[in-house]
Amino acid sequence: MADWANDPALADWPGPVKYIPSPDLAVAKFGWPGVAQYQAWMYRPDPPVFVPTALLIIDMQNDFCGPNGSLAVQGGRELGTGINEVLNEGYFVLKIATRDFHPADHISFATQHPGAEPFTSTYTITSPENPQEKQTTTLWPPHCVQGTEGCELIHELDVWRLTHIIDKGQDKRVESYSGFGPPFENPAVSMSGLADLLNEHGIQKVEIVGLALDYCVKHTAIDAAKLGFETHVLMNLTQAVDQSKENMAAVHRELTDHGVIPLLVRTKAVTDEDVPGIDQYWAEIEAMGKLALHESVSQHE
């Protein structure tokens, strides 16, 4: 197999050659003559290997975004432009958005537990199918309730480009941070169907963006890695609830400890100029005892 990732013939190709370019990207970079370059490359005697990849956009919903979201993440809505640029790329086999889709009496709502306070109170959930399995969760204000505006994907997101929307958290008895479903394993409880969807389409790699990094993004990424998918989190297309350096360091450690690769992505909306200190960002993470920065930096241009 040719070392196509270092092929000098692709030195001027837009973006990282770890992805097979599409005719759309060829036209965008080189004009219509770019299609001929694309075809010549694709039909080489030893063409590159295609890695079926899915984009997972986690919980970009009104209740997780300002100004009126009941559980708004700082900077969440502003991610929409950059996510749309990645969403517009042609190499994804699947483009999936997840949604929290809670009933009004969901177990994670502080209002369901007398005397509890959102954000500070916790509750231990017992698996309805196995009393030996338990999960302790933070209690939240009501959010993403089915049939409410807060449950809808934000209008800044190009929803029409999605191939699927996966709803999670519909079972009022259990919490589901992960896009795959609740953490209970023996047996699994109220899974979302995301794993089946990815496997049905032969997906081998997932790239994850959205909200929130330290909850649903993190748990989705860790589950994806456990299920055998090569898993990337595009770190500057996600935001955390707790944006302190200490928490970011802890999240980074947890991701990498589970085999997840954190990357930075450059788009027209998110460039080195727009986000000064990309190198500083990683230096600070490393300075807090993190693993060395993965040398790959995804460049979606």
Image (cartoon, rainbow, N blue to C red):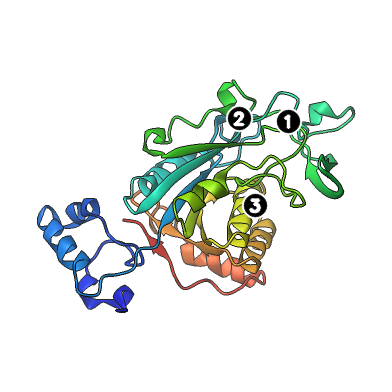
SS class, disc 2: loop
- Which residue: 38% across, 51% down? 92
Q: Disc 1 marks which residue?
A: 141
Position of residue 6 measured from the top left corner of the image (x, y, whole percent): 30, 77
Residues at marks 2 and 1, CA–CA distance in whole angstroms:
10 Å
The first of marks 2 and 3 along the sequence is 2
Q: Disc 2 marks which residue?
A: 69
**Along the viewing direction, whichever of 109 and 272 lies nearer the viewer:** 109
The first of marks 1 and 3 along the sequence is 1
Disc 2 marks which amino acid?
Gly
Query: Left of 164 or right of it: where is 31?
Result: left
Residue 210 is at least partly visible in this image? no
Q: Is residue 286 above or below residue 188?
A: below
SS class, disc 1: loop
Position of residue 280 measured from the top left corner of the image (x, y, whole percent): 52, 66
The first of marks 2 and 1 along the sequence is 2
Residues at marks 1 and 3, CA–CA distance in whole angstroms:
20 Å
SS class, disc 3: helix
Label 3: how many Cα within 10 Å (few below 14, some 14–19, many 20+): many
Q: Disc 3 marks which residue?
A: 219
Disc 1 marks which amino acid?
Pro
For the view shown, which residue lies furthest in the left direction? 33
Q: Is residue 261 above or below residue 168?
A: below
Quadrant of the rendering where the N terminus is positioned: bottom left
Q: Is residue 101 above or below residue 184?
A: above
